[in-house]
Amino acid sequence: MRSFIDAQRGHFRVELICRALQVAPSGYWRHAARQGDPSLLPARVVRDAVMTDQHFYVIPLQYNTVERGDRPVLGGILGLELFERFVVRLDYQSKTLTLKPLASKYQGHGTAVPLTFADDMPLIAASFEGNTGDFAIDTGNASTMLIQHVWAEQHGLAAKMKAGLETVSFGAGGASRNWAIRGARFAMGGQTFNDVVARYAEDSKGSFSSRTEAGNLGTDTLAHFTLEFDYAHNKVWLEPEPGFVPPAFDRSGMRAYKDKPEAFSVALVAPGTPAVKAGIEKDDEITAIDGVAAKQLSGWDIRRKLRQAPGTHVALTVAHAGKERTVTLELADILQAPRS
């Protein structure tokens, strides 16, 4: 059963998985961004590690969060309890997660960075455009870094970032309206990165609504390192991975997500982009991509398709108002450097 790793959340089980396992939740729990039923499972096995009598929250995650195309859905989220009981090593390049005893001594070549915590969210000091702040390490964010709006306003960055490309992202907390820029400067763990892609959000709830954090670091930033989390000693070791190149930003100008197996729903089409030129409209449904039925594809599959090299043609079968047509997208770079 596949689960995703989130360094700050508790253990969660997807509601439909619990039904399949015939696990009956008991009690009730509510959170600002989500709610569910706590369930005590007899054991949780993570490869060779066995954690007994684990407390799980059963939550009705959105379909677009757990779907994987024609593969089985994700079973849940492994979070805080895992990180509190082990030293956790996350190697994005080799796609491995290693669990070590809490007494283990670090044996790598990385830099130790102090961790602080806010509501179980691990934070590190870093800088964005020369401004230092506390940034959340969010291993559940599989995208670019996001700058929180209160901090951005305090440091005179909000207007510049909101002049970027409007987009929308989807996660466990639902949809989030974002603006993306390219060309930012970011530093953490003794390493400096230029030409960074960053998003800005003005959410009122969820992970992207903090009034104290500077930003939220996702995979596109974290994968510049192999990370070894040592919650017991309030630190994370950062080992630079100089060969890592972040994936390209979307080259279509549209955002689509799955709320049912047979189609992707178009949530946003940015003006002047390839999607507009192809005649794509908000609320269109994409039922096939390059001749492959949407039912066989996941949200990650469509993102990979729409990140291909500029000039690539992508054929989409689109349904609107009961009528179906085929359009061709010619991908292009659409994310420009921020206005000064």
Image (cartoon, rainbow, N blue to C red):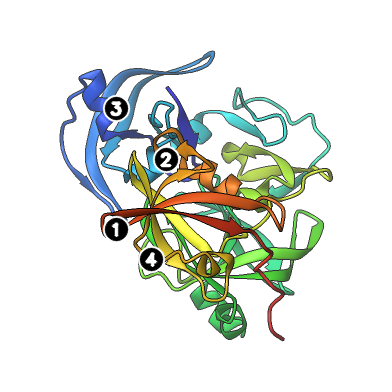
Label 2: how many Cα within 10 Å (few below 14, some 14–19, many 20+): many
Amino acid type assigned to the residue bearing label 4 in the image: Lys
- Three-letter amino acid code at the position of disc 2: Ala
Q: Give me the C-alpha separation between circle 1 and circle 3.
A: 23 Å
Query: Would you name the residue on which mark 4 appears?
Result: 282
211 lies above or below 227: below
Sequence-wise, the earlier of marks 2 and 3 is: 3
Disc 3 marks which amino acid?
Ile
Question: Mark 3 = which residue?
Answer: 17
| Quadrant of the frame with the C terminus | bottom right
Which residue is pictured at 66% across the width and 69% down the height? Answer: 335
Q: Position of residue 25 (x, y in %)?
A: 19, 30
Q: Nearer the viewer, residue 217 or 338?
A: 338
- Work out whether mark 2 precedes mark 4 in sequence or the reverse, and give the earlier one: 4
- Residue highlighted by disc 2: 294
The residue that mark 1 highlights is 32
Q: CA distance from mark 2 to mark 4?
A: 17 Å
Pick whichever of labels 1 and 3 is earlier in the sequence. 3
